[in-house]
């Protein structure tokens, strides 16, 4: 039946060329190719004429053996659904199975592939045997020809309706709509338009039709068939039984045309449609079970199909603006109920702003501004980003365009894409010309996404965000529970002019903040907190000169640590061997394999020093030392708890703890880090109540200054970074704001 909004919709590239959704399977005929412009009358399909009379009709029954149909009409009959009228079938059939949640379905290079043949692997028969077989085959062809004539004439009794029924189904399946329509009682073009519109209304990619049986009585007949329609974008196959009547007029059989030929019970003025609804994307939760996503603006763009004067033009313009496939967009518009708003995409504000000039030119496009927990999240560095239906990631994966699809682009959203996305509910429905739904013909229930619960503490995360909100520069705060390695906060602020680092995976120079590790190594050589060390203005090791702002006064090692005296550590590095230093670095878990973590994270890198100068540079966090804010927080956690842990992001993850640190060394490190906060460069982090321990560093790289604070307080270890264009930064002060917001 014709689509009430349009006749054969033109394709996206040529508005005068009809859309061909797929390349049909063309069976080989002994009599040559079928004629697409006329009735398709195939040769005998091997139907057997059985004696007897149908009890119901009194006429001869011509059952069709599906196994004899060969490659002409493939049988796709996995537990077929037989819906009564417009009633929904109990169990829709999906022979190909569902697409696994979150796995993009790859677009097909050809919408319908033909079946090929393979060799048997047998050796060739001798020439004389081949001649005998050829003669036998010739006799078989003659016999089949006689059988064809007999079937067509009823062996002198009645003209069989079977060839017409088979020809109609074959032409319909192959999308030879004019040929199929010519075999019906409908006026020219009516049946062809209805059949073509039905294929578009289902946005189908494949159609298989198999005749089951035909009952003939005098000048009337009734044929039954099984239809299997591939709704490919969902991995769903809709299988149902249908039937149609035939009438003989002047010795010619024709199909009685009605909408019910397409589907049983379909009435005049009714059409088919496909309704697909994705569940809301499941949330990433904090440790208390609250969503880390926050409500933010979402621009929903879509159309009212019945209001479109040229759906193909709308699909083409929208696809051009968004990079989608215009044919797939048109398929979604054609398959949707005409009087229901069809969402084409949900855009974040930045994407909508960039596409807005082109979207204005899309005819019939409607824009709705809504709010949803989708594109913005706390702990964004861990949660990650979400893309919509227009995401290049989906296109690169060859995913079929489907409104409502979301895709994780990074972080936990990417790692747990399948779990968070769920599966959509799909329904094949019948609607009237006004768009009113009158029946659900098939239904595939969806599956809601399952949330992912993280180790993020709402209290600690909130304190980190509050602290960063009070500075004008860029900054990051990452906090972990020292005793378990569970990540409690991942917060970031990006100010113009100073790029924010990735708190979990950045590779940064830590400067004197790394002297926490160096001090542990030096304590192993006999250096103590009270050991007197001169803090020189400059000191040369292995031909490399290190400088500081010191005056050369002799101080205790504890005070040199608190003041971040690089020259003192460069001089003390001569007491270390490369092996000793490497062993201590490894004991803090630096360089550990974190590849099994659900998100990319950098555990640090301290290559074995090649020479005394390189070793001196590494003791003050320079040279080839690279650390992430997270890996430095894990160093502080190791000092606090006495052993290192692998960071944990998701609730219930295993905790592969590392080797315990030397207890006496841990105690002295506590003393050093406490003194730094009480009287050294880290004193801006000091808070009343529970003691705060830490160390600072200031690094100049290119045009950017980075201030570090690494420390712990009451089982919470953390790293704070503040970045800007000048050296007037204080990560220690930002750490103090964080601890103040967190409370005692």
Image (cartoon, rainbow, N blue to C red):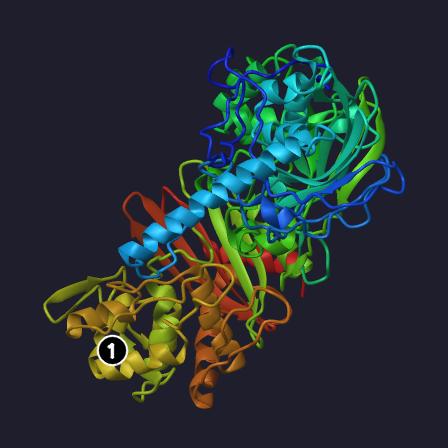
Residue 114 image position (x, y, % from top left): 47, 40
Q: Is residue 643 above or below residue 370?
A: below
Other-residue count near label 1 (Cα within 10 Å), few / some / many at <14 / 14–19 / ≥20: some
Q: Is residue 349 above or below residue 686?
A: above
Q: Quadrant of the C terminus?
A: bottom right
Residue in front for this viewpoint, 8 or 411: 8
Q: Is residue 535 visible?
A: no
Residue for point 59% across, 33% down = 348
Residue for point 27% across, 73% down = 569
Residue for point 26% across, 69% down = 618
Q: Residue furthest left?
A: 543
Residue at the spot of label 1 = 572
Indicate left or right for 101 with 61 as reference. left
Indicate left or right for 43 with 619 as reference. right
Indicate left or right for 680 with 606 as reference. right
Residue 251 image position (x, y, % from top left): 71, 19
Residue in front for this viewpoint, 548 or 460: 460
Q: Is residue 174 above or below residue 411?
A: above
Q: Secondary structure at mark 1?
A: helix
Residue 363 image position (x, y, % from top left): 60, 12
Residue 526 image position (x, y, % from top left): 31, 89
């Amino acid at each position: 039946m014709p689509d009430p909004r349009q006749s054969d919709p033109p394709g996206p590239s040529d508005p005068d060329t009809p859309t061909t959704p797929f390349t049909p399977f063309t069976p080989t005929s002994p009599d040559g190719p079928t004629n697409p412009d006329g009735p398709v009358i195939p040769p005998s399909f091997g139907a057997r004429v059985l004696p007897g009379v149908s009890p119901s009709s009194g006429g001869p029954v011509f059952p069709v053996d599906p196994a004899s149909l060969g490659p002409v009409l493939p049988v796709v009959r996995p537990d077929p659904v037989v819906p009564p009228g417009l009633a929904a079938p109990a169990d829709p059939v999906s022979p190909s199975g569902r697409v696994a949640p979150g796995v993009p379905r790859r677009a097909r290079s050809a919408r319908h592939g033909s079946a090929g043949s393979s060799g048997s692997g047998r050796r060739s028969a001798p020439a004389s045997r081949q001649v005998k077989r050829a003669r036998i085959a010739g006799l078989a062809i003659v016999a089949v020809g006689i059988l064809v004539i007999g079937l067509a004439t009823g062996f002198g009794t009645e003209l069989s309706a079977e060839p017409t029924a088979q020809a109609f189904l074959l032409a319909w399946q192959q999308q030879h709509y004019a040929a199929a329509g010519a075999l019906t009682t409908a006026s020219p073009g009516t049946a062809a338009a209805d059949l073509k519109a039905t294929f578009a209304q289902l946005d189908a990619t494949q159609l298989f039709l198999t005749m089951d049986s035909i009952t003939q009585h005098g000048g009337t007949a009734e044929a039954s068939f099984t239809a299997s329609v591939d709704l490919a974008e969902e991995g769903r196959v809709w299988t149902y039984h249908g039937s149609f009547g035939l009438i003989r007029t002047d010795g010619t059989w024709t199909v009685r045309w009605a909408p019910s030929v397409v589907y049983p019970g379909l009435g005049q003025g009714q059409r088919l449609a496909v309704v697909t609804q994705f569940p809301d994307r499941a949330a990433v939760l904090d440790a208390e079970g609250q969503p880390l996503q926050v409500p933010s603006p979402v621009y929903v763009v879509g159309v009212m199909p019945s209001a479109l004067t040229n759906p193909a033009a709308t699909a083409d313009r929208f696809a051009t603006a968004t990079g989608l496939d215009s044919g797939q967009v048109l398929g979604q518009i054609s398959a949707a109920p005409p009087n229901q708003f069809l969402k084409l995409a949900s855009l974040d504000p930045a994407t909508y702003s960039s596409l807005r000039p082109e979207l204005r030119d899309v005819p019939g496009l409607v824009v709705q501004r809504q709010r949803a927990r989708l594109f913005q999240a706390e702990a964004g560095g861990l949660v990650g980003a979400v893309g919509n239906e227009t995401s290049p990631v989906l296109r690169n994966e060859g995913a079929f365009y489907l409104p409502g699809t979301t895709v994780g682009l990074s972080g936990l959203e990417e790692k747990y894409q399948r779990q968070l996305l769920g599966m959509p509910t799909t329904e094949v429905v019948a609607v009237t010309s006004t768009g009113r739904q009158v029946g659900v013909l098939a239904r595939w229930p969806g599956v809601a996404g399952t949330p992912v619960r993280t180790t993020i503490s709402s209290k600690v995360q909130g304190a980190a965000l509050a602290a960063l909100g009070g500075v004008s520069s860029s900054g990051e705060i990452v906090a972990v529970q020292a005793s378990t390695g569970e990540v409690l906060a991942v917060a970031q602020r990006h100010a113009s002019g100073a790029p924010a680092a990735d708190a979990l995976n950045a590779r940064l120079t830590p400067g004197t903040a790394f002297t926490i590790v160096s001090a542990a190594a030096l304590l192993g050589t006999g250096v103590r907190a009270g050991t007197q060390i001169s803090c020189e203005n400059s000191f040369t090791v292995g031909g490399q000169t290190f400088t500081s702002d010191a005056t050369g006064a002799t101080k205790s090692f504890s005070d040199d640590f608190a003041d971040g005296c690089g020259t003192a550590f460069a001089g003390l590095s001569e007491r270390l061997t490369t092996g000793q230093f490497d062993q201590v670095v490894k004991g803090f878990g630096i360089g550990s394999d974190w590849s099994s973590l659900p998100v990319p994270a950098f555990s640090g890198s301290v290559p074995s020093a090649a020479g005394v100068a390189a070793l001196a540079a590494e003791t003050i966090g320079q040279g080839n030392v690279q650390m992430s804010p997270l890996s430095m927080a894990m160093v502080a956690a190791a000092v606090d708890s006495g052993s290192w842990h692998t960071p944990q992001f998701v609730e219930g993850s295993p905790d592969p703890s590392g080797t315990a640190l030397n207890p006496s060394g841990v105690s002295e490190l506590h003393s050093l880090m406490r003194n730094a906060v009480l009287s050294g460069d880290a004193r801006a982090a000091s808070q009343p109540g529970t003691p705060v321990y830490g160390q600072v560093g200031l690094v100049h790289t290119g045009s950017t200054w980075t201030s570090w604070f690494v420390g712990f307080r009451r089982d919470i270890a953390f790293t704070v970074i503040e970045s800007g264009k000048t050296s007037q930064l204080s990560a220690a002060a930002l750490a103090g704001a964080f601890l103040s917001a967190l409370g005692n």
